[in-house]
Each structure stands twice: as structure tokens, then as C-alpha cells.
Image: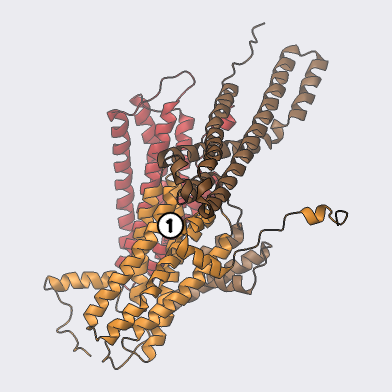
Amino acid sequence: MSAISEPLPYYPRGPALALAALGPVAIGAIMALRSETAAPLLAVPAVVFGVVAATSPALYIASAATGTAPPLSAVVRAFGVALGAFGIALAGLLLPAAFLALSSIDTVMTFAAASAAVGAAAFLGLRRLAHELGAAGKSPYPGAAEIKPSLTVSTVFFVWSAATIGIAGRLWWDLASEVLS
Amino acid sequence: MTLDVIALGYAAIGIAVAIGAALAGRRPGAGDVLLLTAVWPLAGPMILFGDRERADDHELVSALARASTSPLASILPDAETARVLGARLREASSRLTDLDAVLARPDFDPAAAQRRASELTARGASAAAATAQLRVRTLGQLRDLRERYRSELDEVRELIAQLVTQAELVRLQPSIAQASSELVRELVTRVEGLGDLFAYQASLEYEPAPDRSA
Amino acid sequence: MIGAMDGADLRAAPAREPRSPALIDQLLRDRDAIVARIAAGKDLMTITKTMVATIAITMAIVGAALGSYRGGIQIGYAAIKLPLVLIGTAALSAPALTAIGAALGRRSRLTADLALVITALAYGALLLVACTPLILLGRAVDLSYHQMILSTVAMFSVAGIASLRLVTRALSAETGPGRGSAIIGLCVVFALVGGQLAWSLRPYLLRPRTQEVPFLRETEGSLFDAITGAVRSARGIYTRDSAPLGD
């Protein structure tokens, strides 16, 4: 009975994904308040989700090409769980980030607080993604062999993570430079 | 942004949460409104979600931790065993929650499945009727499994409550500590016995599908 | 008599909410019991209200004691500001414990975690109020301003470590992932927010010879601006010709 054996992510997925959608908007609102422009309200979510949407197929393709990919449905589910984790983490870090960003005079502090919140949430989301993909690899298909952790699996994930973080970081820096200068 | 503007914004959100709680039927009192204005990140979830969140899975480890400071300490399982037992109890609670959620779904109603099987039999669709009957049997097994989990967890919780009470009694009368060893042994055996339920559930999940080649 | 006993008489009386003084006493004497109560999800709202009130009253006393080093209106100012610092920091930081843990797979319960954090802080506040005689002793024996500062930091450190121990002990009863990262995350967030809020609401401890006593200092920047400024000054990079003369 797959409905019973399906592992729970320990949080309701719907609200978590809603938080993932609204969290970057809230961060954008904080930056918009400091910069007195509305651009960050759209720009921050665009950077976050745009980068994930653009790079996530690459992870599946690279994993599948190296024979280390769980089924596509499991990868999609893992990304959903990781996005939910990102949303929940960002929701908990939003208040501290808002206070630190808005209570300081220097816009550098605003940038630092917003970056720290989004960066920490993204890091936690990546950690969760790695865990979920690993768990999915334990029972990829009925009757299929387990996809064991290996240097190839780790390398693919690490390279993909580094590229994603690098792209997102550069776009984030450009956004902050334009908005908070 | 100055501190007073931030404080005003913070208080305004608190008042908005209080209004939201009132609209949601929670009816916060004057003290609750003050609390919400001052500490809405703390009080808001309390008022909105209430005390509904419970964690029966922590009860065992907490009860053993409390009893370990009483004269019962010498007959209690060690910390690592307590963790393992606590994890087993949590797993059982989680599986009971899963079963409740699954059996609450309309498509998992045994009566509806039985009606469907009867309809298929009446229409002469014997292969489909056999599958439907298998479904009825499986749903019945799931309900039995749920009742077994519920019954076992109720007994474990009563034993935990008795352990906490016994620990307080033993503080007043340390001489009866050894006589409580049977209670501890019963509790540990019950929690360990949850493993048999897990094995039974696993056997249900991996039952082979019926042979439809005929 | 037997006939008068019907089912209504045999129903167990409903459990009464615990009283606040009993909760505070239990926090001091039997922290395991409070932690078990929170873990079981019992009376969380009552516990939260009691602990917030405890922090407000105890930190007001500690603030008054610190303010008495200078005396006068500073007693009242510090008594108002210190509770705001701790309660404000708790309100802004506590959700991070649940959020970080849940992201990593910890089976988190928001209301219980919030109650745990505020209870731990209330315990630290109670330890601090037990230290107020030492603060007053410092004034009585004319400890220097910097010695007073260091003593205060030491007392707050002890209280902070005690609070952290309570949280760690409560979470050690759990199994599964995310506990350690959640605690570390909470500590980092708490330190950052608490530092900035305390900086924003300063001063608390003033030199006795201070003439003008402001409720809040002029906002010259954040705590981190002050730290970067101090680092620059230490490297010989200054933004003004000279520092203002002391009081």
C-alpha cells in the first residue's frame, strides 16, 4: 500500500510551497522599503525561481546520463520537498532579517541581512534536496538495484549546486547593486 | 527606518493578528490582545493553533527522564535504549496517524468497496469482482491494523502515566522501588512489541497481487 | 447516599490550568517536568503567558539594578528597556528554531518550540534577577565602570548558557535529523538580533558622573557599523578628526 509507506516530509507540502512562493516576495519587500523602489518585489522571486527552474533540468539530465538518477517523478518530488524546506526556513528567518535590515542606517546591512536569510534558506533547501535524492535512490524502481552514494553522485550534485549558487549569487549581487546603491 | 516606526509597524501587525484571531472565532480576551500586540510571533501561533499540537512520542522519553531522578533510576533502561524505545513509539504514533488519514479517504471506505464487489459479481464480471473482493479484504485488514495500533498505544500511554505516578510514590517511599520493576519491564516489553505490528504491516504491504492469468 | 451517586458525580473533574506561581516554582525546581509538559503540548498558552510576564518583571528588576549604578531617571529607563530587549529578541528569533529544524526533517511543533524558547529565556531571567544583589554590591563598593561592564557581561553569559542548556536538554530527548542545526541556527539568529536590538536601545549602564541621561542614544548606525568602525579605527582609518571629550 504505497499510500502508507510514502515517507512524510514532516510538514504539509501545500503551505510549505506557498511559503516558498511568498518568502522571496517578502524579502523583496524589505529591499523595496529600503530602496524606495518596487522593483525588488518582482526581481527577488524572479532570481530565486528563475535560477531553480533554469538549472534543475540540468541536474536530472546529468544524473541520468551518469546512471545515478532516481525516477523523474522521485526527482520532481525531491525538488518539491526541497522548495518547501526553503520556504519554511525563509519564513522563520524573515522576521530577524527584516529587523536587522530595517533598523540599520547603512544599506550594506540591508543587503547583508537579506542575503543571509535567502542564502541560509537556500543552503538548507539544498541539504534537504541532497537527502531526498539520496532517499529516492534507495528504492528507485520496483525490482531495481539501489543507487548507492558514490563519488559520481556527489560530484554531479556538487557541481550542479556550485553552478546554481554561482548564477544566483551573481544575479543577486547585480540586483542589490542596482537597487541599494 | 527609525526604531519607533519599526515598533509601530510591529504593533500594527500584532493588532492585525488579533483581529484575524477574532474573525477566525478564537475570541481573544483583553490579555490575549495585549500579548498579541507585544509578542505576536510567539502568541499568534498559540492562539491560532491552540494547544492542538501534541507529541505523544515524547511522553515515553520524558517520563523515563523524570523517573531517572527518583529511586526508580536503577531499574530503568539506559539512555540509548530509551531513545530507541521512544523512536519506536513515535513511529507507531506516526503510522496510526497515517492509517487514520488513509482510512478517512472516501475511496478507502470498506462499505463502498463491498458494494462495488457485489455489483461486479451481479454483473458476472468475475475477474473484476475477485479484485474488488481482495480490496475489501485488504481494507478490512487495514482497519484491524489501525485498531491494533490504537489499542497498543493506549496501553503504552497508560503504562507511561502509571510510571510517572509510581516515580512520585517511590520518592515518598523508596522501599517500594524494586517492586516497580515489573511495571518498567511491562512498559519496555509493550513498546518493543510494537515491532511485531510493524512486521505485520509490512507483510500486508508486500502481499503479492492475485494471479489474473486465468 | 449510593442512590445519589449518578454518572455525573462519577465523572472525573476537568484538569485545571496550572497557576503561574506554581509554573515559575516548577521552572526553578524541576525543569524536566516543565520540559515534559511542553513536549506533551500541555498548557502551552498558559506557560507562554507566564514566562513572558516573568521575563518582563525580572528584567525590569535587573534593568533597575543596572540603572542604579548611575541612579536617578536611569533606573526607570533601564527598567523599561531591558525587558523590551529580551522579549523583542525572543519574539523575532524563536520561530527560527522550528523553521530550520523543519527544513532539515525535524518533526517540529511550532507552538511547543516557541514555549520552550520563552521558558528557557525566563529561566535565564530568573537567574539574572538572583544576581541583582551582586549588581547592587558592585555599586556599593564603587566598582569602576569597566569592571561593572565586565561583571554584567559575565552574569548575562551565565544566564545565557543556562537558557541554552535548557533548550539543548529538551531537544536531546528527540531522535532524528535537524536538532543540532536548529539549535545552532537559533543561537546565531538570537545573537544577531539581540545584539542589534540591545545596541539600538542603549544605554543601560551609565557612568555615575553622566550629566545628560538620554532614553536612547542618537542612532549613529547599527551594532555592525560600530564593529566595522572599531576595526577601521584599530587599523588607523578614521572618519573624523578627533573623538569627542568624555563626560
Query: Who's the residue at 60% across and 62% down the image?
Result: B47
Tell me which amino acid carries mark 1: Ala
Q: Where is residue C87 in the image (x, y as percent from the top left)?
A: 45, 70
Q: Residue A90 sits in which quadrant?
A: bottom left
Which residue lies most toward the front here? Answer: B175
- Colour brown maps to chain: B
Q: Answer above or below: position of B82 versus B48.
A: above
Badge 1 element:
helix
Chain rendered red: A
Q: In this view, does A147 lie above or below C106?
A: above
Quadrant assignment, res C205: bottom left
Q: Give the residue furthest to the top.
A: B214
Question: In this view of the protein, which residue sits in the foreground, C68 or B68?
Answer: B68
Which residue is rendered at x = 57% and y = 21% of the image?
B203
Position of the C terminus of chain B, as image quadrant, is top right
Chain C colour in the picture: orange
Q: Which of C32 and C6 is in front in this view?
A: C6
Where residue C175 appears, as percent x and y from the top left, is 44, 42
Is residue A126 toward the left or the right of residue A162 in the image?
Answer: right
Structural crowding at the residue carrying mark 1, measured as other residues with C-alpha within 10 Å and reported as few (<14), some (14–19) or many (≥20): many
Dot 1 corresponds to which residue?
A: C96
